[in-house]
Structures are given as C-alpha cells and as structure tokens.
Image (tube, rainbow, N blue to C red):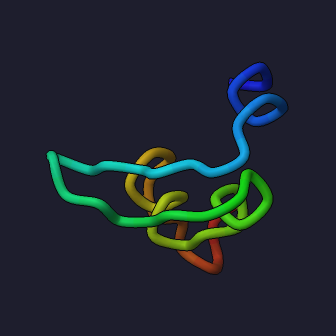
Amino acid sequence: MSLVMNICEGICVLNFGKVIAKGTAEEIQNNDAVIEAYLGKQDKGEN
C-alpha cells in the first residue's frame, strides 16, 4: 500500500463495487468510510 500511496496522484476506493471515496492519499487515509470498510468500525470504548 505504501507504493500506491506514494505514486498515485488520486485514488478511488471501492466497496462491493460502489465508489465510497475519491481523493489524495492523505484524504483517503483519513476518510471514515474507507477506514470502516477496510479496517472495521471500532467502538469508542474499545482499545
């Protein structure tokens, strides 16, 4: 992933064939929808 994040000007993220985010690497890394889709949703009280 670091290669993709370093060489791409723009990134489009899909979840089950639907576009959930478009933007720069920094925008994608900080996008709540992308984080939830690919890493799961974390409860606030969870560590």
Measuring from the top left, give residue 36's x and y in whole percent. 45, 61
Point out the residue furthest to the left here.
17
Which residue is drawn at the image coordinates 38% and 55% (left, top)?
37
Q: Nearer the viewer, residue 10 or 40?
A: 10
Q: Nearer the viewer, residue 37 or 11?
A: 11
The vertical placement of 7 against 19, above or below, is: above
Which residue is drawn at the image coordinates 16% and 46% (left, top)?
16
Q: Quadrant of the C terminus?
A: bottom right
Measuring from the top left, give residue 45's x and y in whole percent. 64, 77
Q: Is residue 34 left or right of residue 20?
A: right
* Tally of numbered tags: 0
Point out the residue furthest to the front here.
9
Q: Is residue 16 left or right of residue 2?
A: left
Q: Image quarter for residue 29?
A: bottom right
Measuring from the top left, give residue 46's x and y in whole percent. 63, 66
Point out the residue furthest to the bottom here.
44
Q: Quadrant of the N terminus?
A: top right
Q: Is residue 20 left or right of residue 29?
A: left
Measuring from the top left, give residue 42's x and y in whole percent. 54, 65
Which residue is drawn at the image coordinates 26% and 50% (left, top)?
15
Q: Is residue 13 left or right of residue 46?
A: left
The vertical placement of 47 against 3, above or below, is: below
